Amino acid sequence: MNRHELVNLIKERQSYLCVGLDTDITKIPRHLLSHADPVFAFNKAIIDATKDLCVSYKINTAFYECMGIRGWESLQRTVEYIPSTHFTIADAKRGDIGNTSTQYAKTFFETYNFDAVTVAPYMGRDSVQPFLSFHEKWTIMLGLTSNEGSKDFQLTPSGDEMLYEKVLKAGMSWGTPDNMMFVIGATQSAQLAYIRQLVPDHFFLVPGVGAQGGNLQEISAVAMNKDCGLLVNASRSIIYAGNGEDFAQDARVAAQALQQEMAEYLDVALAAG
């Protein structure tokens, strides 16, 4: 999916919601455990209930890799089931020397046909560049994350700027607004306005809304650009909104509340021009 298609989808759907399918088999409703593939059965129900409310699905591969081959089969079934109209993200946080990164990129862009993959930039340009070489695919580079440990490196000085600033500037020089996004945590709202000034055109993948406490109104007010420029991810607050047989309907209610709020913020942004 290219940028033009993504922006149009956001405007048509009046949503910049990304639903995180971080599916933990120990947390899904017990009645699904009798299915041959309980994780896929859960994901299928969540997708059916939310697909008209969101523009993207993010699959955190850790929740699938930990189950071995069965997990990878669940992942493949899930990504194949997601409608082609939606932007798909492999949240894999890969990043290694060039020839290894090339294989990672082939895994997620060719074998599983995701639209985007998250990458960790610690090893530098040659670990990120292979992902950027794929046509109409997106690299989503870690910028400033929500976790407590972000203070250990990202928010430490590097010369006359913070390390995360150096990372963002490097990423902008490696990719373009058409193939590079940045992960900016929702709980970093104090930095978001500055980051948007620093990075005016790129999309941000913003995790941390919902269970982690990020504020959608604050994020939208300071980080939206003329193309929206945001994919706001919610995982646990949506997929685990209920745990009974009607869990999918509960997930829909949670997703709809976010989508309706997003529609208000989009109307304001578009009216402002």
Image (spheres, rainbow, N blue to C red):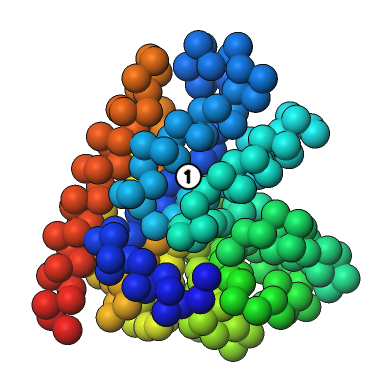
The residue at 13%/70% (across/down) is 268
In x, y percent, where is residue 105?
Answer: 74, 65
Q: Quadrant of residue 101?
A: bottom right
Q: Quadrant of residue 267?
A: bottom left
Whether residue 201 sits left or right of residue 64 in the image: it is left
**233 vs 153: above or below:** above
Name the residue at the right extreme: 99
Q: What element carries label 1?
A: strand
Query: Is any atom of residue 212 visible in this view?
Result: no
Query: Which of the two residues, 84 or 108, is positioned nearer the viewer here?
Result: 84
Query: Which of the two residues, 203 or 212, is positioned nearer the viewer here?
Result: 203
In x, y percent, where is residue 30?
Answer: 51, 11
In x, y percent, where is residue 205?
Answer: 45, 62
The residue at 18%/63% (across/down) is 265
**53 vs 14: above or below:** above
Q: Crowding near pointer 1: few (<14 within 10 Å), some, many (20+)?
A: many
Please state which amino acid type lies under the numbered disc 1.
Answer: Gly
The residue beneath circle 1 is 20
**82 vs 160: above or below:** above
Q: In which quarter of the image is residue 236?
A: top left
Whether residue 29 sits left or right of residue 255 in the image: it is right
